[in-house]
């Protein structure tokens, strides 16, 4: 190992320019979520391992290959959270929220998975998400999708995204479909990948998600879920699609879109893009009526989604994230002016305006730096200004320079 101090592989430093985009995405999502009645929830970064192992499934790639598991000093098996829904569901149960249904939660924060780093994918990555608990109506699915669409519009990327949607049907439909899949894949078991052979026994729907080329060929001729949908499932999906159409949200049905775990049902959806290469999914969600029951809680319907902030930020136009606000440089022309400039900048910030001090170097250099950082105005103070309780105001756009009193500065209108 090199002695050079460096980042851990798969992590990143969010420098100010990156943080500006992240902040814009998070604030946009938070503001839209509030409009839809979602309250913010923040769960711990680590949970008992069982929280994720039970919800993600012991046969999932995440649990088998990607979770950061560790034993603490008390001998407890803990896991850094690889996703957000399980923590929200655990909080719902452990905090005794059953009497308060329906509930809507919004969250954001870091997640952790040990996977191969690539563009838009990191071992410490960031997600935001929304969870709606207590509604079994297809209209809740519509509203959940609408929130996602509104956020993508707000951050300026909806035109580059496609809503892909499918139905998994209800428990009865899934059971019939599962039986058909097991029968089909068992007949071709010798052609399945090692991972899919494991899935065949516990989680056959996940074979349809396989990236293995051999599995993909088998999947092309596998039974289709739509053949096994009962009337209840067909009606539910029809109402979801009608609701999306009423809101004018464009979509396409993708019958290959599935979720392997048994607690998922009815609606599954993803917003995808061609702008990020192979990593095309920017937001994914679905209905999970069986999740809370799987974790030991009461039967509680739910629908939600999660989105990768890293990927959303990569797509977001930078100009949207940059707030159009005036920047005022406060420049001391000499020692007296420098000392007083700290107070003047403090007073400017008290007005809610952005001010930056330049506290070293000669006057000319300070003005050059102020111009370089994009200052709209410079407030110049020297010994004379301090003595006379005035300040010289320079407008960088016009080059105009005027001297005003410190009293007049309190109400001076700075324009971009």
Image: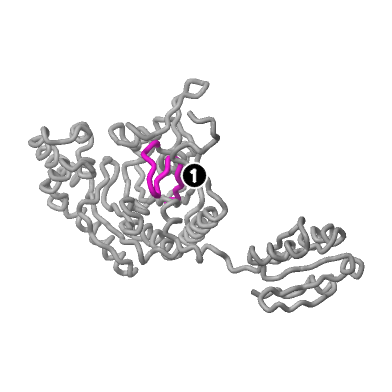
In depth, the one of 8 and 229 nearer the eye is 8
Viewer-side residue, 382 vs 26: 382
Which residue corresponds to the image point at 48% horizontal and 36% vertical from the top-left?
8
For residue 115: magenta?
A: yes
Q: Which region is colored magenta?
A: 114-130
| Residue 347 is covered by the magenta coloring | no
Q: Position of residue 145 (x, y in %)?
A: 36, 59
Q: Position of residue 335 (x, y in %)?
A: 86, 58
**Position in image of residue 309 (x %, y %):** 45, 52
The foreground one among 199 and 106 is: 199
Q: What residue is shown at x 16% (from left), y 49% (from top)? A: 225
**Quarter that holds the C terminus:** bottom right
The vertical placement of 128 against 47, above or below, is below
Q: Which residue is mark 1?
A: 12
Give the residue at the far right of this rendering.
387
381 to the left or right of 302: right
For residue 240, side relative to residue 357 (left or right) = left
């Amino acid at each position: 190992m090199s002695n050079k101090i460096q980042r851990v592989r798969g992590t990143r430093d969010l420098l100010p320019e990156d943080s500006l985009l992240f902040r814009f995405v998070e604030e946009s999502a938070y503001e839209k979520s509030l409009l839809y009645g979602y309250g913010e929830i923040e769960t711990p970064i680590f949970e008992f391992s069982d929280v994720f192992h039970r919800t993600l499934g012991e046969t999932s790639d995440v649990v088998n290959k990607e979770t950061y598991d560790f034993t603490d000093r008390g001998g407890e098996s803990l896991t850094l959270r690889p996703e957000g829904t399980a923590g929200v569901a655990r909080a719902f149960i452990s905090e005794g929220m059953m009497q308060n249904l329906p509930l809507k939660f919004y969250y954001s924060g870091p997640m952790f998975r040990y996977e191969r780093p690539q563009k838009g994918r990191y071992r410490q990555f960031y997600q935001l998400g929304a969870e709606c608990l207590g509604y079994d109506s297809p209209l809740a699915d519509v509203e959940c999708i609408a929130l996602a669409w509104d956020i993508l519009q707000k951050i300026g990327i909806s035109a580059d995204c496609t809503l892909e949607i499918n139905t998994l049907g209800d428990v009865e439909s899934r059971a019939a479909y599962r039986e058909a899949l097991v029968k089909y894949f068992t007949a071709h078991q010798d052609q399945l990948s090692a991972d899919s052979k494991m899935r065949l026994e516990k989680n056959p729907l996940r074979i349809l998600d396989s990236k293995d080329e051999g599995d993909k060929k088998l999947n092309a001729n596998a039974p289709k879920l739509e053949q096994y949908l009962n009337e209840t499932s067909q009606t539910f999906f029809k109402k979801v699609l009608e609701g999306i159409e009423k809101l004018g949200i464009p979509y396409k049905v993708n019958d290959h879109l599935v979720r392997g775990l048994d607690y998922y049902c009815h609606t599954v959806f993803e917003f995808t893009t061609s702008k990020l290469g192979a990593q095309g999914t920017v937001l994914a969600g679905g209905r999970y009526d069986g999740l809370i029951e799987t974790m030991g809680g009461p039967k509680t319907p739910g629908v939600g989604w999660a989105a990768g902030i890293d990927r959303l930020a990569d797509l977001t136009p930078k100009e949207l994230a940059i707030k159009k606000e005036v920047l005022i440089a406060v420049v001391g022309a000499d020692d007296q002016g420098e000392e007083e400039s700290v107070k003047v900048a403090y007073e400017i910030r008290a007005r809610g305006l952005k001010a930056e001090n330049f506290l070293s170097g000669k006057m000319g250099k300070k003005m050059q730096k102020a111009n370089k950082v994009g200052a709209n105005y410079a407030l110049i103070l020297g010994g004379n200004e301090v003595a006379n309780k005035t300040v010289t105001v320079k407008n960088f756009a016009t080059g105009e320079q005027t001297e005003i009193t410190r009293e007049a500065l309190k109400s001076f209108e700075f324009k971009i």
